[in-house]
Amino acid sequence: MHIKTYPPLTVLSSIHQTTMSQLQQFGPVMAELYAVAGRKSFINGPLHWIYYGMDGNPDTVFTLEIAIPIRKAFQSTKFKVRELDFFKAITFPHEGLWEHLPGSHAQIMERLAEHNIPVTNECREVFLNIDFSQPEKNMTEIQIGVSPGKTQNRSASKRRLFPVYI
């Protein structure tokens, strides 16, 4: 695991109130986002699923933002174009089936608790490689938001980060 700070990012996104048990219904939204951004040739990075207020309880309602980075803002009648803020996070690679993502999240949260690292209410999954025909080849980066200033990975705000291993 590493602590990284991600710069602001312009995205085309779709925002929903949902629960963990309802997540599978959002596959078509992902395809529509790709279609809209792809028609304009504006895709500028991998797909993000951003969770606000998800606590691991399958019945908790939280906010899900499905977002595709774009290289510049444009008008969309169906989706929101916005800029994500700086994001400081602990990162963890997940390879394989998405059904195993909750287990990876649990491992990360255990490690963070062991090291008393405070987390925010935001976490992200960045889908680096999506392979529907061979899902064991999926590569996802899990990013758990950590409170700015609570971990020591920057001595100055403009300096590049060094990884922190925990």
Image (cartoon, rainbow, N blue to C red):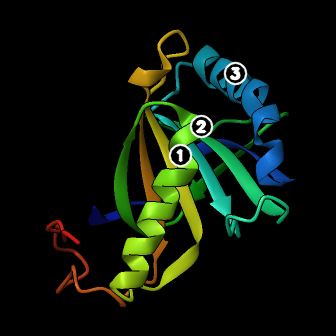
Q: Residues within 10 Å of mark 2 (few under 14, many from 20)?
A: few
Where is residue 140? Give x, y as percent. Answer: 43, 39
Task: Give coordinates of residue 145: x percent, y percent.
Answer: 48, 70
Q: Quadrant of residue 29?
A: top right
Give the residue type at disc 3: Ala
Q: Which comes before the other along the chain, label 3 or label 2?
A: 3
Can residue 130 be seen at all in this image of the molecule? yes
The kind of secondary structure element at disc 1 is helix
Q: Which residue is mark 1?
A: 101
Q: Are marks 2 and 1 in contact (CB under 8 Å)?
A: yes
Label 2 to label 1: alpha-carbon separation = 6 Å
Mark 1: amino acid? Leu
Picture layout, residue 58 above or below residue 86 = above
Judging from the image, what secondary structure is the residue with disc 2 in? helix
Residue at the far top: name it: 133
| Amino acid bearing label 2 | Glu
55 up-or-down from 50: above or below: below
The residues bearing labels 1 and 3 have C-alpha atoms spaced at a distance of: 21 Å
Residue at 52 percent across and 26 percent down: it is 42
Q: CA distance from mark 3 to mark 2?
A: 19 Å
Q: With respect to residue 145, does 115 lie above or below?
A: below
Q: Which residue is mark 3?
A: 31
Whole-percent x, y for residue 153 in the image:
21, 79
Looking at the image, is mark 1 or mark 3 earlier in the sequence?
A: 3
Q: Which residue is mark 2?
A: 99
Which is more toward the observer, 100 or 122?
100
Q: Is residue 117 left or right of residue 119?
A: left
Residue beneath the point at 36% across and 89% down: 149
Which corner quadrant of the image does residue 13 belong to? Answer: top right
Quarter in which the C terminus is drawn: bottom left
How crowded pointer 3 is (Cα within 10 Å; few <14, some 14-19, many 20+) is rated as few
In the foreground, 120 or 13: 120
